[in-house]
Amino acid sequence: MNELVEITLRSLFVSGSATLLAALFGLPLGLWLGARARPQRLAASLLYAGMGLPPVVVGLFFYFLLSRSGPLGSLGLLYTVPGMILAESVLAFPLIAGFAMAGVAAKAEPVRRLVRSLGGSELQVHLTLLAESRRVVVAALAAGFGAVISEVGAVTLVGGDIRHATRVLTTAVVIETRKGELERAAALGAVLLGVTLLITAILVVFGEREAR
Amino acid sequence: MIAAEGLEKRFPGFTLRVPALKAAPGEILAVLGPSGSGKSTLLMLLSGLLSPDGGTITREGPAVYLDQHPYLLERSVLENAAFGLRLKGVPRARAREVALFWLSRVGLKALAPRPARGLSGGERVRLALARALATEPKTLLLDEPTANLDPANVARVEALIREEKARGRAIVLVTHNLFQAKRLADRALFLLGGEVVEEGPAPSFFDSPEDPRTRAFLSGEMVW
Amino acid sequence: MRRLLFSLMLSLGLALAASPLRLATTTSVHDSGLLDAILPGFTAETGIPVQVIAVGTGQALAIAGRGDADAVLVHAPALEAVFLQEGKGVLHACLAKNRFLIVGPPEDPAGVRWETNVLNALRKIYLKGALFVSRGDRSGTHKKELELWQAAGLDPQGKRWYLESGSGMGATLTLASEKDAYTLTDLGTFLFLREKVRLVALFDRDDPRMLNQYSYMVVNPERFPWVHFEGAKKLRAYLLRPEVQEKIGAYLKDRFGQSLFEPLFGRCVIPVP
Ligand SMILES: Nc1ncnc2c1ncn2[C@@H]1O[C@H](COP(=O)(O)OP(=O)(O)OP(=O)(O)O)[C@@H](O)[C@H]1O
Ligand SMILES: [Mg+2]
């Protein structure tokens, strides 16, 4: 099989899994924080700071964590796809939770007012808020996915860029650049951009559909 | 019927105090006052959206609050109009039927299938009004329902308010439109900086206000 | 598609399946494609897949020094000696050599091409203040460059004409080409990029200081009991086998008219104590 296809699919698999893993925890947290009546300043500061986590630093952290000489070394996750997914999900988590929180917080007050003023219960407030958060969720997922698929620092350190095992689009771009094969690097970059655009577009179309 | 006594609400730098207020069934109470005088705060207290720091509120039957800046759901116009009924557990088909009736009453029937997000300012207010009226509340708390409307739609909404009044609703109407207040109100209340300056039956309120500040406000020479 | 799913599952199941051999290597060896030419033979023979992690020599030794690789292929004799002394590595073997060159713009503003001694060549660049790009990344090549400056009794750090790229050899050559600057490069990377850059070999002589020696070491299993010691030992034996050494020497010789890697058959030309 074509190596480019292999690398592209691996990129999608790693970033997709990491996004889902991060969303599993990040979306409920973000929605919950956003729906709280009082602004959650501490949580917000932490999440917004987390959005700026340098991927290389996260990669280094996971390198030490997963290294055979490190605390989780016996799991043998360093230089494997699951290890990369873990590191990437940590990068995606604050983005997903933060975007979800900000998006929901902006709607929480008006939605609460609407539902309560029409005689709805607090439970109905939350259900409505959830239903009204489709775009927010999409934006959060797109932000998380876009960040991890285009990131190179963490995947390099944790994945090791091993051919046929952990090489993804961004690390492939780095190698071709290093080799001076700038045209190939640019072509890979175009594939990366196209894939990201495609996935994001699918997400957005999905989120734009009017409910029923 | 809706009534309040000794109502008080404190915000940092702003306090609303309303000693007494009442709108009986079939009665319209107009709330007047400059921007920032506490009109919306008062309506939210009456609706229960805000809890007062002091005083009591008596509500007979459900009260619905029409937001000054109504939130429209990311759904169709029809679904928005049916939303209040859906919250009460009315089956979808029935809720849509009723919603469609109210949409036609505010002149939005043709827009029923459209996404609500694309509506104009005036259309948004009318949709929110239809959504509120569809739940058949005993008390209506309307926060500037005609602020963004053209004359024809102002007339249409005013006719609706009159009709609701005739059906025995108690109505509190916040408006900046003095002529509208004169046309519709049975009683009027003038708020200034969170304090009730004057409250009374509409004829005497508009024709012979007691407080000089009310007089100044009514003649458009309010200074504050 | 099926193969990809398979390979994804394989990589997922790595923690459970028999772990492959991990070789940490310098980027110059990896990027030349040499390993892709010789490792499949090893895998076919022994059934041991080899995963290559291409990083700078410094990083290769660092990760191997924590037991995160089973063997290393590097080119920095001084650092290798330290690695062995610290008990992190065993079974050192010299595999191949080539040479470093000084390349630069064809105009050669500092007149490097007339020098027979590399230290004098560097002195000319220094005195002229001609632009020079350093890797600046603690790679084997960077290490070599620093040794040369020191041997010449010069300190270019902080000079306006001394640029540090902080990136790989290919990127550094591209940068030097754009800037009409000199740089120190290994032979292999330069041969690959010769057509793409406006740089020519200006100092390319048999100077012992310009020797580039590639060595293989096995990570010490007494220190890191989890390493794939048997596999690493087998790969060492395989790489030192005469016919494999010949194959290393012949790699791309037709294309470039000279060996990218001259086999050493285990005999070091730079001693590693
Ligand atoms: N949640 C709040 N926290 C603090 N201050 C508030 C809050 N809500 C309202 N206020 C303040 O209370 C005052 C009255 O606000 P309110 O919205 O009731 O005015 P209004 O009479 O409805 O004005 P407008 O005609 O512009 O709608 C304003 O000074 C406002 O800033
Ligand atoms: Mg208001």
Image (cartoon, coloured by chain):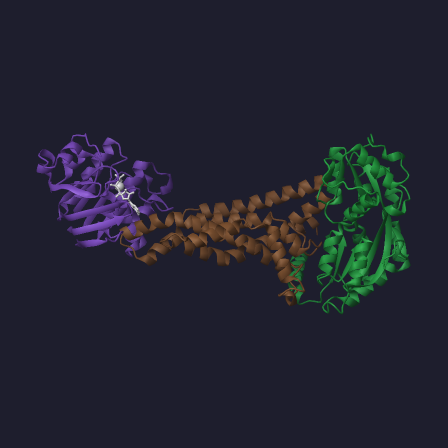
Chain colours: A brown, B purple, C green
Is residue B101 something that shows in the picture?
Answer: no
Given residues A94 and C123, the one toward you in this image is C123
Ligand number 1: quarter of image = top left
| Residue closest to the far front | C153
Q: Relative to C253, is C104 above or below?
A: above
- Image label count: 0
Frontmost residue, C268 versus B21: C268
Residue B5 position in % (x across, y down): 15, 52
Q: Quadrant of residue B37?
A: top left
Q: Quadrant of the C terminus of chain B?
A: top left
Residue drawn 82% across the image and 64% down it: C234
The reply, left or right, for residue C176 in relation to residue B93 is right
* Left or right, C140 with reference to A50: right
- Judging depth in this view, the residue of C257 and B199 nearest the camera is B199
Q: In the rendering, at what x and y percent does residue C246 appear?
A: 90, 54
Q: Residue C99, can we see it?
A: yes
Q: Where, by quadrant of the figure, is residue B153 drawn? A: top left
The residue depicted at 29 percent of the width and 42 percent of the height is: B127
Seen in the image, is A27 located left or right of residue B168? right
Identity of the residue drawn at 61% across and 57% down: A61
Q: Position of residue B159 (x, y in %)?
A: 18, 38
Q: Residue at x 21, y 43 (%)?
A: B194
Residue C67: image location, x then y, percent: 72, 63
